[in-house]
Amino acid sequence: MIQLQTNIADITLAIENDGMLPDYLRKEQTQALQNLLTENDFRPHNDNQGPYKLALSIEDNRLVIRIKNAAAQDLNMLVLSLKPYRRLIQDYFLMLESYEQARHSATRDKLEAIDMGRRGIHNEGADLLLSRMESKITMDHETARKLFTLICVLHKTHVRLVN
């Protein structure tokens, strides 16, 4: 029997303007949150008292992750520059928008090709997140993929992307 890990018990997102989220992006956010809270592997290196509560926000164009352990103790706040993610986030939104536009008229093969591209961007974003958190957090690739989705949602509500 496989035991699912759930080291993250709760996640809050500091979304500035919820009304800016298109329905398809809101759906991505909801799905990522549900999947993340159902199964995740997330362990801060300086603490073993999970499960953890995460609060994600964007402050001064940086991703800020606040973590509390099961004893409600604040752990070190993680602050990451969003610059390395900028291209990936733009590409992610382009893929989502392409899929939404094609959904009504494209062939199944076209939709699958767009979805494969989106998954590739997701994987790249997850790999970048894993490498940047390597000395602070241990997490699996699927957890990083879901967190990348949430980073994109936060970015969409805080920063105007320029093409």
Image (tube, rainbow, N blue to C red):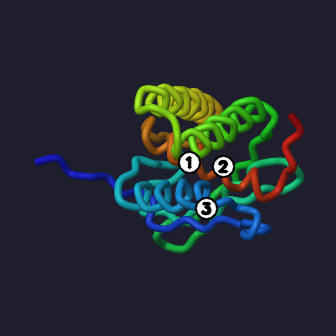
Tell me: 136 left or right of 78.
left
Tell me: 86 left or right of 28.
right
The circle drawn on residue 45 is none
Tell me: 4 left or right of 35.
left
Q: Which amino acid does label 2 sit on?
A: Ile
Q: Which amino acid does label 1 sit on?
A: Leu
* Residue at mark 3: 23
Q: How far apart are marks 1 and 3 (CA)?
A: 19 Å
Single out the mark in the foreground, 2 or 3.
3
Dot 2 or dot 3, earlier in sequence: 3
The reply to whether the C-beta atoms of the residues labelled 1 and 2 are less than 8 Å apart is yes
Disc 1 residue crowd, few under 14, some 14–19, many 20+, Cα 10 Å: many
Single out the mark in the foreground, 1 or 3.
3
Dot 1 or dot 3, earlier in sequence: 3
Disc 3 residue crowd, few under 14, some 14–19, many 20+, Cα 10 Å: few
User: Where residue 123 appears, x then y in whole percent?
Assistant: 52, 30
* Residue at mark 1: 147
Say which of 123 and 7 sits in front. Answer: 123
* Residue at mark 2: 151
The residue at the far front in this view is 105
Q: What residue type is labelled 3?
A: Asp
Q: Distance between the residues labelled 2 and 3?
A: 17 Å
Say which of 125 and 49 sits in front. Answer: 125
Q: Where on the picture, by quarter, is residue 75?
A: bottom right
Q: Indicate the secondary structure of the residue bearing disc 3.
A: helix
Q: Quadrant of the C terminus?
A: top right
